[in-house]
Amino acid sequence: MKRFAQLPTRRHQKGVAAIIVGLCIVVLIGFLGLVADLGRLFITKTELSDASDACSLAAAAELKGDAESLSRAESAGITVGQRNKVDFQANNVTIVPNQDVTFSDHLNGTYYTKNAVAPANIANMKYAKCTLPRTGIMPWFMQVMGAGAQSVTSQAVASLSPSQTNCAIPVGLCSQTPPASCPDGSAPDSYGFCVGKWYGSRFTAGGGFTGSFNLIDYSPPSGGASELSGQLTGAGQCNLNVTNPVGQTGMQQSIANAWNTRFGLYQGSYNVSNAPPDFTGYAYTAISWPSQYNAYDGTDGTRPNFQASRTAHTVYQGDAAAGLSLTGSGSSATSTQLRDNGADRRMVLMPIVDCGGWTGSQTVPIQKFACALLLQPMQAPGSDTYIEYRGQADLPGNPCATLGLPGAGGGIGPKVPALVR
């Protein structure tokens, strides 16, 4: 009788499954690491990208060619960029001064920190780059495979680009007959204005126009004090171009209160949170700036010009020192509040219009956009206030960089910050 070989017993298979599971666990951890750890690096990169975009856009908005522009640009980039978070929104982004924000005169040129740019070359810096690294990211699972700390870096470059639409305050400059020459001997522009010259207006409670500028209505015949106040405390009226017809409007006290928030002066429900001030509230009047010319970056004795007062976060000096008489009681922003809550609020965009056209029509078209400096808080209705003309907003070198949509601006608006890389 043939004998069959003895089949292996179950005890000979012990430990095989454990070996297979052990081998599979290593592979599974590897795949899990690829998914989880690489996904974490991707999310970190995305978070850094948001921060670098915000940083470069904020920095580019300050590239206006003056001596302090790079310092302002770096400060703005750091402030805005560090409002973003990283590590699944758990930690603040860190931006190192004089290292992570750099500038160049060409998109593909060499980028320098602000301290490495010679004073003579500051005006040529057109591009702001933010380079934000994140190092020491320890893998969750890939450590099993021997992987160490990882790092990711995000870069963004922004520059000022012509806008196709713009945001302007509800104040219009009236084109006028050009004078023979400007105070500095230069020729006025085609709309009759001189860069650096002060222009005044008389806002009257009953409406009408008697000066170089007045309040205007971007949505005639609707609108009113509430709409205009919202534009003055907010970004202004946006999505504007030269096809927009504008109407004439009268003065109301609530407009003065809204105007004054840009100087850090608050009445009623206005405060630094719902109506941001500029970086300075210092007022320029015939008393505080006797020459009444070029308060933006000029000289007038020992008094600080606008650029200097912004850098120092100088507060409104008070009615007596300014020679003004503001009505009502209220609060004034501190230097710290101007620094922490301030924005570009006194360099504004104003449309240039033919005010004579209002005599035969309820509305007139926008002819051009102008850049202007708000010089002083507004007093009671019927009193004068002044602005300083800083040029047509589409011309190189003007200091206006306001809100708007980048694109083909048609040569009418200011340059606005836009990402270029």
Image (cartoon, rainbow, N blue to C red):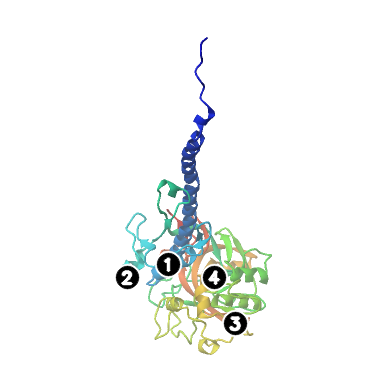
Amino acid marked by disc 3: Ser
Q: Are marks 4 and 1 in contact (CB under 8 Å)?
A: no
Earlier in the chain: of badge 1 and badge 3, it is 1
Earlier-in-chain disc, 3 versus 2: 2
Give the residue at mark 3: 331
Q: Nearer the viewer, residue 237 or 234?
A: 234
Mark 2 or 4, closer to the camera: 2
> What amino acid type should be assigned to the residue bearing mark 4?
Cys
Q: Viewer-nearest of labels 3 and 2?
A: 3
What amino acid does circle 1 point to? Ala
- Circle 1: element type: helix
Of pointers 1 and 2, the one earlier in the residue sequence: 1
User: Could you tell whether 114 is left or right of 30 in the image?
Assistant: left
Cα–Cα gap, marks 3 and 4: 33 Å
The answer to whether residue 163 is above or below residue 5 is below
The answer to whether residue 90 is above or below residue 290 is above
Task: Tell me: residue 358, above or below residue 6.
Answer: below
Residue 110, by quadrant, is bottom left
Q: Which mark is residue 174?
A: 4
Tell me which residue sits at (57%, 70%) in the image. 171
Foreground residue among 3 and 334: 3
Badge 4: how crowded within 10 Å, few (<14), some, or many (20+)? Answer: many
Residue 73 numbered tag: 1
